[in-house]
Image: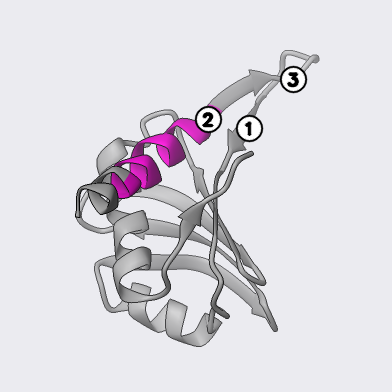
Amino acid sequence: MLGHMSDTKIKFSEGYNQTNFELVTHRSGNYELPISSAAHYSTNENITIKIFIDKLSNHNYCLIAPYKEQKYFSSKILDCKTNEFFHIKIINKKIRIYPKDENFSFETFERIVKYIDENIVSIKLEEK
């Protein structure tokens, strides 16, 4: 059990530390571009996109402009509990979680990773 708890802590804290968001001023100085780095997770199981979407939609997450085709899925997502946005991409057996602004909290990150891991598909943190 202790090993499981440390694995879970790593799954959250190291994953969150992989994420980054910044606004970079365009060289013209006329506008800023959002740049974000994702947390990288993978699974040994196939991810059924329809089930993934249905489970998120029924658990305090609002999918905004979702896009899917075969084994690819991408969507901006609102966590209705924390009122924060993030972005998820799924390609085959890989899941990427991107912050959408500099205020992306550990609470929001932990909620989505825990929800995916416990209710949709078992995931593990990847080295970047």
Magenta segment range? 7-21
The residues bearing labels 1 and 2 have C-alpha atoms spaced at a distance of: 6 Å
Q: Position of residue 71 (x, y in %)?
A: 67, 78
Q: Is residue 12 magenta?
A: yes
Mark 3 residue type: His
Q: Position of residue 20 (x, y in %)?
A: 52, 30
* Element under disc 2: strand
The quadrant holding residue 102 is top left
| Residue that appears at 44% across and 85% down | 51
Q: Is residue 122 left or right of residue 9?
A: right
Which residue is denoted by mark 1 in the rendering? 35
Which residue is denoted by mark 3 in the rendering? 26
Q: Nearer the viewer, residue 99 or 111?
A: 111
Q: Are marks 1 and 2 in contact (CB under 8 Å)?
A: yes
Mark 1 residue type: Ile
Which residue is denoted by mark 2 in the rendering? 21
Q: Nearer the viewer, residue 75 or 64?
A: 75
* Element under disc 3: loop
